[in-house]
Image (cartoon, rainbow, N blue to C red):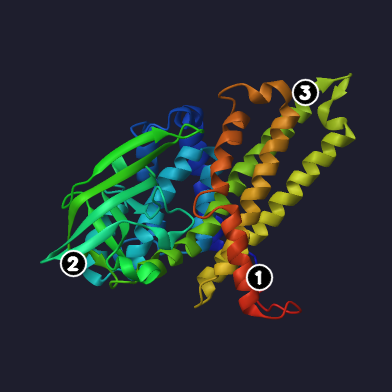
Amino acid sequence: MDFTFSADQVQLRLKARAFAEREIAPMADELDAAYDYHAGGVERIKRSGLYAYVVPEAYGGKGISSVNLCILREELAKVSTFADEVFVMQGLGSNPIVRFGNEAQKRKYLPPLLDGSRMANFCLTEPAAGSDVAGIEATARREGNDYVLNGRKCYVSKPEHTDISVVFAKTRPEAGAKGISAFIVDREQSSYGVKTEKLMFEGDIGEITLRDTRVPVENLLGEEGQGMGIALGNLDIYRPTVGAAALGMGRRALSLALDHARNRRMFRQALVDFQVTRFKLAQMKVELDAASLLIYRAAWMADQSRERPTMEASIAKYFATEAAQRVVDQSLQLHGGIGIHKRSRIEHLYRAIRALRIYEGTSEIQLLVIGRELLRGGTLEHDDRL
């Protein structure tokens, strides 16, 4: 397997890095402290052209590649966790339409995503159904030319600023997982309640309340009962990108640790001159490089394979988020007292990285998926997917 990035991928990384450092870095502390959607950073992201990478070429985009998505998330998260969130919510919300929408749905909903004139979102989790997707309780019943949706969706990114939401609800509650369907809920057509609250790293998270929310029949995504496959297929694509965001945050934490260790003097020498410091820095580097290989393997497989890389996506997400957590923790430890100053960059990363081990499947769920897929695969002596 050749892990060399193509010339286009190298250029994309350089483009994303230049944009993040030039346009986002000068205001990153402000953006990450407030998570204000109205801040200038959002408009800069919209003008950057990066949303083209979540839209197929047939609808004006650059085409969708899992490797490209990972590159973009890694570079954005390295500079600003807010910028990463504003980018990924567009992809996570639109990908079900890309993969399962009919031609009319794609032509209506995908082009406006390119410049951010409309924003998309993904609404799966409920107060009583997170890891247990089949346990969702939202319902959708057919009434003439509409579906009527009722239920609550939580942990939704920026719902007050979202125009297009892919919402999952049960059209046949008695059928369990096989009764879940997916719907495009357009705020120009359908009304619903929204409330938001702050997370531990200052990010906004929201809840959508559906009370007899009417959705036109033509907004059914795929077929009735296909929702579980749509949801899990979307997670297979985006779980490695969560690992990529964690990788970006980890790389920033290592960079901060290196800078601090070189400049901090104690006992008449630099902190970096102590062997224990070098051991910590070396361990951080090893963990991040291992995470990178797992992330881009899963992304490469998603781009090349006709089969969903379910196990590889979970391996990448699990290892990268856990490793990045350890790296950020060790970086803060090396910073000593200044590392726990509120609003310092490493303190923000320490709070922000924690969420990545939870959303889009907790670390424990990833282990369950890996174990299940491992048992399905049979022998452990040879795995040609490596």
Circle 2 packing at 10 Å, graded few (<14), some (14-19), many (20+), is: some
Q: Which residue is mark 2?
A: 218
In this view, 342 is above or below 161: above
- Residue 20 picture location, percent across and down: 50, 41
- Residue 146 picture location, percent across and down: 14, 62
Residue 5 visible in the current orientation: no
The picture quadrant where one finds residue 226 is bottom left
340 with respect to 227 (left or right): right
Taking the spot 71% from the left edge, 80% from the top edge, the residue there is 379
Q: Which residue is mark 1?
A: 2
Q: Secondary structure at mark 3?
A: loop
Residue placed most toward the observer, 47 or 321:
321
Which amino acid type corresponds to the residue marked 2 in the rendered image? Glu
Q: Which numbered dot is residue 182?
A: none
Residue placed most toward the observer, 2 or 313:
313
Which amino acid type corresponds to the residue marked 1 in the rendered image? Asp
Q: Which residue is mark 3?
A: 264
Circle 3 packing at 10 Å, graded few (<14), some (14-19), many (20+), is: few
- Residue 31 picture location, percent across and down: 45, 31
Disc 2 and disc 3: Cα gap in Å?
62 Å
Taking the spot 27% from the left edge, 45% from the top edge, the residue there is 209
Task: Tell me whether the residue at label 2 lies in contact with that at label 1, contact meaning CB atoms closer than 8 angstroms.
Answer: no
Residue 275 visible in the current orientation: yes
